[in-house]
Amino acid sequence: MDLNFLPSLNSRQLAIDLGTANTLVYAPGEGIVVDEPSVIAVETVNGLDQIRAVGTDAKLLIGRTGDNIRTLRPLSAGVIKDLEFAEKLIRHFLGQALGGRPLLSRGPELVIGIPSASTEVERRIVHAAAVNAGAREVWLIEEPLAAAIGADLPVDQPIGSMVVDIGGGTTEVAIIALKRLTYTVSERVGGDKMDEAITAFMRTRHNMEVGLGTAERIKQEVASAAITDEGNLVVGHAGGRDVTTGALIEREVSQAELAEALQDVVQQIVALVADALSHAGPEIASDIISHGFVLTGGGAMLRNMDSVLREATGLPVRLADDPRHCVAIGAARAFTNPEYRSELHATSAI
């Protein structure tokens, strides 16, 4: 599908996946131009807050700052919880996406992915944050629909499709036909809960306190959604502090242990998928039985997540070719293709 059919506007049109853990910006004709953590570091100087760092630079400061610097995420479960810092986050990333050029007088047009369960007030807050950050126009698209478009599902056809989008803050499962979400269900469970589960496990099993950054690293390097034959052979290393003595220590942790740590989180996702499948109508159910469903989002990249869902449902399951970028890619396709543009929502600011 050609994302570049409006070349005169390419520099002014951007698609944003504004995620709890990471923000991605897609520019038609260029691809992903921003892929950064949704984190801001704020320094208090003489009682006033100043932005110290944004994105990757800010994430590096988590757990490594003094009392005068704090790190925060302006979003929670895909929803803006701090409008002021969300505006600063978006403005910073827009500047990156535009190559450091100052925002033009009318600003770029943006399409932003939002959770399907977002309230009207939450949608207006997203709109206000983007406009205050310099956007000229703001359009919104439900993230599961954008993810399905980005994963090349036939959402414009009279065929039932299902997408499981596992993000940092939430997992959303959606059934789609003819560009419409016929059923959606979401839960505040995703990559962040996986990290928290690993930190809790390390504390109880190894009497060791590790940071969320360390938990995220060993999740990406070693962790699995299920115990496999090589589960006790694949080992990662985690450094932290002994809970009892306070001494600095390092421990080996096996893939099998991490699968145990993540069991509750994985089962929550399995239950969410089962809930969606139970609400599929007969014809759509037949389509899903024939074609299965697709996994998108960074959390879907957890090893063997597709195998666990395949075994739990008995259906074909595939991981999207580019799972982390599906929402941003799909939002851009919807924005620049007249066939999908009608599915976008214009929302007035508060």
Image: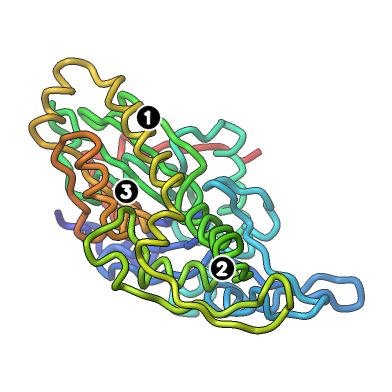
Q: Which mark is residue 335?
A: 3
Can you say which quadrant of the picture contains the N terminus? Answer: bottom left
> Mark 3 is on which residue type?
Phe
Judged left or right of residue 312, residue 65 is right
Q: CA distance from mark 1 to mark 2?
A: 39 Å
In the image, which is nearer the foreground, mark 2 or mark 3?
2
Is residue 95 among the parts visible in the rendering? yes
Looking at marks 2 and 3 on the same chain, the residue that comes earlier in the sequence is marked by 2
> Which of pointers 1 and 2 lies earlier in the amino acid sequence?
1
106 to the left or right of 331: right
Task: Kindly give the residue lying farthest to the top in the view shown.
Answer: 282
- Residue under label 1, please give it: 184
Vertically, is 159 above or below 78? above
In the rendered image, residue 177, in percent from the top left (x then y), is placed at 21, 28
Disc 1 residue crowd, few under 14, some 14–19, many 20+, Cα 10 Å: many
Query: Is 345 or 56 nearer to us in this picture?
Result: 56
Other residues around mark 3 within 10 Å, as few (<14) / some (14–19) / many (≥20): many
Taking 215 as reference, is 350 above or below it?
above
Disc 3, SS = helix
Viewer-nearest of discs 1 and 3: 1
> Residue at 37% of width from left, 64% of height from top?
223
The residue to which callout 2 is attached is: 206
Does the image show residue 139? no
Question: Closest to the observer: 28 or 49?
Answer: 49
Q: Nearer the viewer, residue 175 or 203?
A: 203
